[in-house]
Image (cartoon, helix red, strand yellow):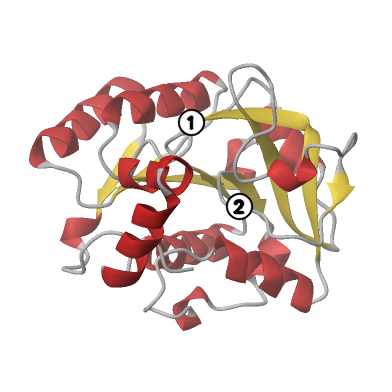
Amino acid sequence: MVNDQMIHIVMPVKDSLSTTEEAVRAIVASGYTLTVYDDFSTPENAARLDALAVETGIRVVHLSALTGHPSPNYRLVLIEAQRTCLEQNSHLVIVESDVLVRPGTLLRMCEAVRPEVGMVAAVTTDGSGQVNFPYEYARRWKTDRVCSKRLSFCCTLLTNEFLHTCDFGQLDPAKNWYDVHISHLSMQMGFTNILQLSNPVLHKPHSSRPWKQLKYTNPFRYYWRKLTQHLDSI
């Protein structure tokens, strides 16, 4: 098994504790350590995260101790995680709180790392094994492949080599999400990004932000809320 010091695993969390607990336990069961960034969950859920840390040995960082900026604080998570990876000379793995890894998932991602690789992502599927959001574009693909389209941060490794070439402190603070920008940045810097079709993870989309389900059930309301409330900026 790859030494877990070779990867720094982070999970941004905003409430949705039942799904988060499943996601955390799946990583811990695979033998890895994990840092959870609590992005202004309710006091009750923040306390539950602390209890989960005592039980499982994960590390919980409450972003309320670092910033007064309201959620989402993905930029801050990325800055903190990059700093740790550069100090430890490790790769960064981001696993979202609505994703369940399988035994061997993270190891197989590590095995795909090469000097020319910037990012490695595990494809996401639903409970039936069907490729789902955000990788619908890959449903017809049969094998792992270099991906010229965007990668999501659902379950993604950012290599140490790539982390040395960019400064996440320069990310636009007006944005909410950065997976599209960073996956394109990796390619612009000459790296290749790999989507692993043979290494799927279970994805329960938007469990931490249920309003985003409107994208599928009521697109008009979703885009109206996105535009009028300046939400979900990528």
> Is 8 in front, or is 97?
97
Q: Residues within 10 Å of mark 2 (few under 14, many from 20)?
A: many
Q: How many marks on residues?
A: 2
Asked whether residue 186 appears in the rendered view, the answer is yes
- Split into 4 quadrants, where in the image is the N terminus? top right
Q: Quadrant of residue 23?
A: top left
199 or 1: nearer the eye?
199
Residue for point 30% across, 61% down: 225
Q: As rendered, which of 53 and 205 lies closer to the eye?
A: 205
Q: CA distance from mark 1 to mark 2?
A: 14 Å
Q: Quadrant of residue 220?
A: bottom left
Classify 10 Å Cα crowding around label 1: few (below 14), some (14-19), many (20 and above): some
- At a point 29% along the width and 45% down the height, the residue shown is 14
Residue placed at 65% from the left, 36% from the top? 3
Q: Position of residue 226 (x, y in %)?
A: 35, 64
Q: Which residue is mark 2?
A: 152
Residue 2 seen in the figure: no
Query: Is there a contact, CB below 8 Å, between mark 1 and mark 2?
Result: no
Task: Tell me where residue 140 appears, x and y as whole percent.
Answer: 85, 38
**Does 199 sit above or below residue 39?**
above
Where is residue 104? Give x, y as percent: 69, 24
Residue denoted by label 1 = 204
Relative to 168, say whether 6 is above or below: above
- Point out residue 167 in the picture as x, y percentages from the top left corner: 54, 78
Secondary structure of the residue carrying numbered label 1 = loop
Which three-letter amino acid code belongs to the residue tagged 1? Lys
Q: Helix or strand or loop: what does disc 2 sit on?
A: loop
Residue type beneath disc 2: Ser
Q: Earlier in the sequence, mark 1 or mark 2?
A: 2
